[in-house]
Amino acid sequence: MVSTPRLVIAAPASNSGKTTVATGLMAAFSARGLAVSPHKVGPDYIDPGYHSLATGRPGRNLDAYMCGPELVAPLFAHGAAGCDLAVVEGVMGLYDGASGQGELASTAQVAKLLKAPVVLVVDASSQSRSVAALVHGFASWDPEVRIGGVILNKVASDRHEALLRDALDESGLPVLGVIRRAPQVATPSRHLGLVPVAERQGDAVDAVRAMGERVRAGCDLDALMALARSAPALADEAWEPAYAPAESSGSPRPVVAVAGGAAFTFAYAEHAELLTAAGAEVVVFDPLRDEKLPVGTAGLVIGGGFPEMYAPELSANEPLRRAVTELALSGAPVAAECAGLLYLARELDGKPMCGVLDATARMSERLTLGYRQAVAVSDSPLAAAGTRMRGHEFHRTVLEPGAGPVPAWGMHQPERRVEGYVQRGVHASYLHTHWAASPEVARRFVEHCRAR
């Protein structure tokens, strides 16, 4: 049974202040000495970085599309084990999910799967009495979603607060917090959302501290904790990564190098856990700073991030680019997603990259964003031909050509196409995947590393 107190922080729409409130709550409760488990609904990689900074624990994603609804509660239980409180930040508006698929992957669906009370964050900057109608509509839309209270954000003055409170008195939902307009809790954004924590360093620490102070000053933390404790126990067992087979437990652990640093910040915590459980020694390196791959590297994982922001620096690190190229040409297993795909290309925005793939990449005005259904076109160290996975694309770059002679994936939603590259031991693609849904991917990758 999972009895961790928990809250889902949702909103009527994007840009209402979910990240500020959720991160602020995590920081405020952590400052009280509580162990807080941070979670994010959906595929977003950036918000969990702020959550991790606020709590000192890995930010974890709960994605009902990529992992399936049946894994949401087990993955939550895995992350929340031993914690005093879990805070789950929603995605978009409360009832917004995968396009054309009803509630799938919505914050509302995740709240129901977790049997968690919802706190609705309302941007009150341009309304007064209408806030009651808005809150009533969200609270009554789905009777299985329990909205336990409201936090009013971007409140202008004492007079504005009084008007909002008077209106909400009729709704029957308590006001659990009022947060005034405050530029110091804002975080800078760019073409794919917030600027990641790894790029802001001290500024990110200051921003999270400011969020915590604002939330602590404006919210009733005791009432919020009482609401979190009202969540009933879950019967789901915690997810666990699959362990290495006994026959390989005595053999040396192959080193799997995982790209990190400011240019490669997109990673799900479960990936490293799965690789470790499959028998690998996971070593993180920074392509912006390290001129060599970790000693003994048998396989390489290069996830997503913002290589376009660091193209000159990545290009200038010629020793590492050569090392990556040599490893790939040797046939070693290499798994590259999105940013990793660009790094393996011949060039990015005119700057030389590793040249493993005969392709060029450039920034684009067009945002490619959405869930995908995919099937592996051919065998690779990552996936056997015919393997079906769900994933997510999220980029403003274009790779030409978009697929190699042997593509990585055949896409089936929203349109039919092939994408990515498989050559030697390389599997490179724009598609972000969550390996918890298919743990055999990690096992297969480590087996190929061990076989070298």
Image (cartoon, rainbow, N blue to C red):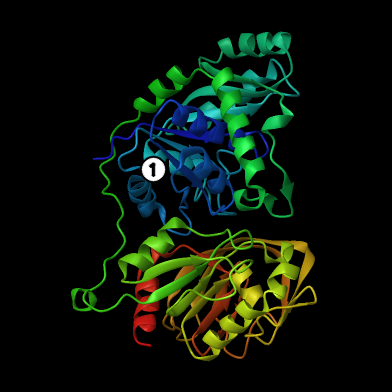
Estimate the x, y position of residue 194 in percent, counting from the top left. Answer: 67, 47
In the visual, does 145 lie left or right of 169?
left
Callout 1 amino acid: Leu
- Residue 299 lies in what quarter of the image? bottom left
Secondary structure beneath dot 1 equals: helix
- Which of the two residues, 184 or 369, is positioned nearer the viewer here? 184
Estimate the x, y position of residue 434 in percent, counting from the top left. Answer: 46, 62
- Which of the two residues, 312 or 339, is positioned nearer the viewer here? 312
- Residue 431 lies in what quarter of the image? bottom right
Q: Residue at x 55, y 36 (%)?
A: 23
Q: Residue at x 38, y 83 (%)?
A: 448
Q: Residue at x 59, y 63 (%)?
A: 264
- Which of the two residues, 176 or 352, is positioned nearer the viewer here? 352
Determine whether 107 is above or below 165 in the image: below
Quadrant location of the C terminus? bottom left
In the visual, does 10 lie left or right of 199?
left
Estimate the x, y position of residue 357 in percent, counting from the top left. Answer: 64, 85
Determine whether 101 is above or below 289 in the image: above
Q: Is residue 341 visible?
A: yes
Residue lying at the far left of the rendered structure: 246
Kindly identify which residue carries mark 1.
113
